Amino acid sequence: MKAKRLLALLLAAALVVSLVACGGSDKKKGDSEEVNLDDTKIEVCIASEPDTIDPALNSAVDGATMLVHLFSGLAKWSQNDDGKLEIVADAAEELTEGVKNDDGTVTYTYTLRDGLKWSDGKDVSAKDFEFAWKRAASLELAADYGYMFEVVDGYDKITEVDADGKAVNPDAELNVKATDDKTLVVTLKNDVPYWNELLAFPVYFPVREDVVKNDKWATDPSTYVCNGLYKLDSWDHDSLITLKYNPDHPDADKVKMGTIEFYLSDDANNQLTNFKNGDWKLIDDVPTDEIATLKEEYADQFHNVGQIGTYYVCWNINENILPEDSELKGAEAEAAKSEIRSALSLILDRNYIVNDIAQGGEVPASSFVAMGLTDADGSEFYKNTGVSEDYVGYFDTSAEAFEANFQKAVEILKKYYKYDESSKKFTNMPSLTYLYNTSEAHQAIGEYIQAAFDSVGITMKLENQEWNTFLQTRKSGDFSIARNGWIADYNDPICFLDMWTSGSGNNDIQFGKGDNAKVKAYSLDLTDLGFDTKVENGTWAETYDVLISTIKACTDSEKRYKLMHRAEDMLMSTGCICPIYYYTDLYMLDSSVSGFFSNPLGYKYFMYCSISEGE
Amino acid sequence: MNTKTLWYIVKRILLAIFTIWIVITITFFVMHAVPGGPFVGEKEPPKAIKQAMEAKYGLDKSPGEQYVEYLKGIVTEFDFGPSLKKKGRSVNDIISDGMETSLKLGLMAAGIATLLGIVFGAVAALRRNKFIDRFIMVFTTAFVSMPSFIMGTLLLLIFSQSLGWFPANGTKAGGLVLPVITLALYPMAYITRLTRSSMLDVLGQDYIRTAKAKGVSGPRIIFGHAMKNSLIPVLTYVGPMLAYIVTGSLVVEKIFNVPGIGRAFVNSITSRDYPLIMGTTIILAALIVVMNLITDILYKVVDPRIQFE
């Protein structure tokens, strides 16, 4: 036993020594001295192993975070001296203005900066961009985010399908051309206000034809050729991805962090232990039930920043919620259902959900288009919904307004259901089932909604399904009411609006599908905005789909935003979307780290980080 | 080795192959019957892209055709196909990476568990009802009844978070110490108890009494006579235990962030990565089948009284 004890002690001592030795290399030299980048290292954990770090195939935020370090696209997100985020030129000399063509298309011409090199030493050419974009948009690659090129002329032809779902133009290509090694010319279908932001999106990053010929190129550092501030130094699958700065990049002098180690973990508890240990300086996930404690104990290290997304509850539009003996039909029935759903949305106390259940600094939501998206004049889109001067969004989410909202809801519901004054409950409301994907957080919110509905006499069962099954069930419309959430890919409200057209694969609510396809209950009048569209009592396809096409074809920015407000008004008037809160991105950052920033899409930037001594 | 033994082994190998084939078949069809799919995501791509994706991985064919093709791939090239989620990686790569870690972890844990288990068990048996026996029994009862997620979390709290002796991350130097201990404790406790009772049983038998009567020394009785026979039940446990540790270490892998096969297995199911589900299931099933086979054959080696039928 003695020998064993001794051995254990020795082992522990050896470990402590080795850990101290490792820790030493983290330290930065004093500010007065020149910092040697080779001595700087930050260890972070943003997620588990990314599915891919091929810029064209990636569709995840964690993959994107790595990619913005590894690649230089034409544009990038940057933080200016005031701490404000902006899109600036990266591989391009400047972000030029587009030139409008006679047919309404817009052509942009970019010149590449000098000195851009691939990590294997070859020059970056405009042809690499042309190749990369065509590849990313091709059916052959079948990338999840290929549709990010839908604004580019030619993309619609690529994805056009016949009745059997077969592509009809196998030779179609994007309208992008490298006229020489330095010049890239691209033509968009029309003026796209968020074009520069798209250029900073990883799917628009360049790759080289000879590199990606090997379809395993992006899984191994020896074949991974990139053109950004960092190179892929090592990838220990499912454990660790290490990036080392690239001294040959034209902006290498601005880099402050020599090595970034992305540890790969999907367990929030494990991440937290490693953060508390001081091993990992940033973790992107914390256990839900620890949030309240962490907010107090680590007040200066616990961060939640706005993210352009909305957590909401969606109704299946084809679910009949009218009382059995209701005689309402067609448009009248649809109007009644819309009114009922909107009323039920008012009986939920969003402040309670945010403060006592979710607890992650979320913001109560009163619109579908999330907080953080900008309007035509640069103000926040959700603040301009224009329903009332007194509050923001489609209803008042303030704590004081809750009682009045609740009473208003009860009054509306009384029009359709029998109300028992003594129990203060409705007696003939159909029972519902709330579908959510298995997770404690979603369950807690589901239970709250169940209790809130029960207070007015609605019986609601809770049903949870495993994620993938849940997605399938919700997509196919096999639910009455379900948990939902949407996070935008770029800062433009259209991300939240074009998903509800009748043909969209993301139309979970089933607008214009099934029974709703024939319901003529929707109206659209755009004459006041100078369009000749006027439909009264049309189907969803005749109204909303037309409105979305109009938005996509509209080149006048101000009008376009007005049209988008119309689209959201139309969506919200159905009551099918019951917004709960606007998402926030929650992470923990060690207080010794400075120079860190993240963008509204959740990408984290470590290149300008430095770690102060004494930690 | 006589022909009877050889025939038995051949028969068992054939049976093992048959078992694995059954596992493949059931998994394949159940997997395709589960709702959802590898390309179902929160953001639905355009139809043309989705079709192109399915065509790329042969998912546009009928399950029957896919099944035949899949079997052909395994039998002729031992190729489990590409992962549908981890773009550019083959299932073979993912499995061999995960297996390497899991085997390392599993073998270390199994080795420690077996060695310490036998030693503690023998000590407890020899000092029956003495303090040391009671002491060992109390602890082994605790370890046997404590699930690994509690033990793992406890060790993590004490040795990583509070004392800071070991990293909370299996990929760092020294990171495997805590997961190995967590994994080893249960089987060690079990083996201790098994060895103790089996040793007590053997020590009470006539041939031991005879040896004692003839004046054979204590250690010789234990190591020369009693040990070999008392280890037969332990042996039956060790084989399946190894398979169990390697395949069932998911919880420990999660707690300590160890990149093993268990995590790949569970993630493949939630993401409907069909080839990876198949690959991991087959390998894990094969491991269990093979370990059982080896155990059965080893029986014969340690105990010639056992007859093959």
Image: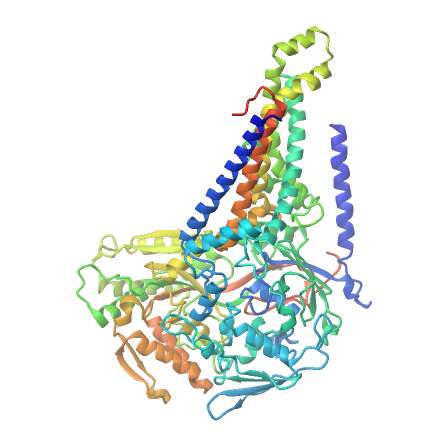
Seen as rendered, the residue at the extreme bottom is: A102
In the rendered image, the vertical position of residue A79 relative to residue A315, given as above or below = below
Left or right: A515 in relation to A171: left
Q: Can residue A311 be spotted in the picture?
A: yes
Q: Residue at x 48, y 54 (%)?
A: B69
In the rendered image, the vertical position of residue B121 relative to residue A253, given as above or below = above
Left or right: A94 in relation to A511: right
Seen as rendered, the residue at the extreme right is: A33
Frontmost residue, B240 versus A245:
B240
Q: Residue at x 50, y 55 (%)?
A: B273
Q: Residue at x 51, y 72 (%)?
A: A146
Q: Position of residue A139 (x, y in %)?
A: 49, 71
Frontmost residue, A492 versus B235:
B235
Could you say which quadrant of the image residue A109 lies in?
bottom right
Seen as rendered, the residue at the extreme top is: B213
In the rendered image, the vertical position of residue B4 relative to residue B73, given as above or below = above
Frontmost residue, B130 versus A164:
A164
Q: Position of residue A481 (x, y in %)?
A: 34, 59
Q: Position of residue A154 (x, y in %)?
A: 49, 81
Q: Can residue B137 be spotted in the picture?
A: no
Q: Residue at x 77, y 59 (%)?
A: A27
Query: How are the colours assigned in the image?
Result: rainbow
Q: Quadrant of the N terminus of chain A?
A: top right
Frontmost residue, A243 versus A407:
A243
